[in-house]
Image: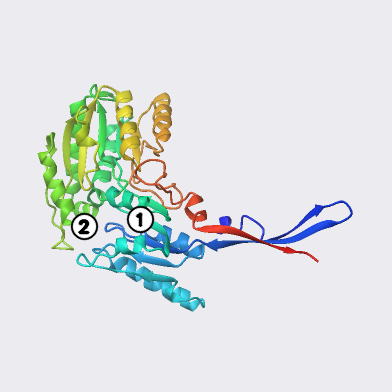
Amino acid sequence: AYEELTRFPAAVTWEKPMGKFTVKLNKTFKPVPYGISLAIGCSTFPIWNTLPGVYASLITGNTVIVKPHQKAILPIAIVVAELQKVLKAQGHDPLTIQLAADDPEHLITKQLAEHDAVRLIDYTGGTAFGEYVESLPGKVVFTEKAGVNSVILDSAKDLGPVMQNLAFSVALYSGQMCTAPQNFFIPEKGVETADGTVSYKEVVDLLKESVNGLVHHPKMGAGTLAAIQNVSTLNRTHNVKQLKASLVLEAGVVENEEFKDARTCTPTILEVSADDVAVFEKELFGPVALVIKTKDTQHSLELASMMAQKHGAITCAAYTTDATVQQNIEETMNAVFTPVSFNLTGFIWVNQHAAFSDFHVTGGNPAGNASFTNPEFVNRRFVWVGNRTLAD
């Protein structure tokens, strides 16, 4: 933001020769804030998803109203209070940022979003409301909505570390991350490894065993799964058994010794045919993983890219030891504006996007229209205005 605000000089002298005399103008340029900014928060990550837009609007001179989700008010309320303290200490009006909380009985989000004075909107949440926000006339909107994230399994040196990594990715925060993988595309012939081909069934069994081993680990399970934020997510997880799919691993409960009343749920793994597009083309928010048998890696890639182009994707994980295959996956998924994480094992997972170094949400597919790191995320929040004065 600082770079964008200082991109042009604040003042220049402009001269135009007119024969025997010269016209000289003193020109000044200044960035003018676009207007009041509304940050609509989500329930699962009320701080991480809200602060980039808040900071981008504040540093470009816009007043910010933070509208938290009704079930996640306290975390962002604490942050807003601290920001107000800092503003006041620096001699600024603390009400440059304000909190506008509501409750399910008296919703105010649409009232705020549609208000003429609100010119900027940052939104994180479901697709339906996100599309409504994007449709509002006269607003500059930045959205992060739902996406269908894929895993493409082609080959690996050792499937053990791969499946442990993917199991953690599925279980982390019980799949309630916008970056969590959902669709696992596995070729029917299996996956090539340094020790030979691992059959399709063996790959699926290894994923199941890895998830089970993690979630029932006495020191890791409960802390990794955390809690289910919304009861509707829990209900959705249990209801997926009604889909046209085979049950590989059924959801269960893990006792959390530290938080006895925590709402927990272990991941469900379902197996579907590549023809069952209606099942795996939707985001099943929560601890749900779908295993999809494909003809080959190229078929997997075609399905993954189609999902991203049609429904959006924020992440894609891919595993291959073939440089040519890797290049093909990268180019195909990048063409539908989806980043790819290749061959992640150990203590780094596809879920982990650093807000200010990974172009989180490219803004190029239906998962969202903005990226946190793109300069456009800040320079659309102000307008350059120039003034001219005739020089003496």
Residue 384 lies, in percent from the top left, at 58, 57
Residue 266 lies, in percent from the top left, at 16, 48
Residue 366 lies, in percent from the top left, at 35, 42
- Report how many numbered discs are placed on residues in the image: 2
Residue drawn at (87%, 51%) of the image? 19
Which amino acid type is marked by label 1? Tyr
Visible residue check, residue 154: no
Q: Secondary structure at mark 2?
A: loop
Residue drawn at (31%, 48%) of the image? 178
Figure quadrant of the C terminus: bottom right
Image position of 173 (left or right of 369): left
Q: Is residue 300 above or below residue 66?
A: above
Q: CA distance from mark 1 to mark 2?
A: 19 Å
The residue wearing badge 1 is: 123
Residue drawn at (21%, 52%) of the image? 225
Q: Indicate the quadrant where residue 54 lies.
A: bottom left
Image position of 293 (left or right of 143): left
Q: Is residue 313 above or below residue 222?
A: above
Residue 229 is tagged as 2
Q: Are marks 1 and 2 in contact (CB under 8 Å)?
A: no
Q: How is the image coloured?
A: rainbow
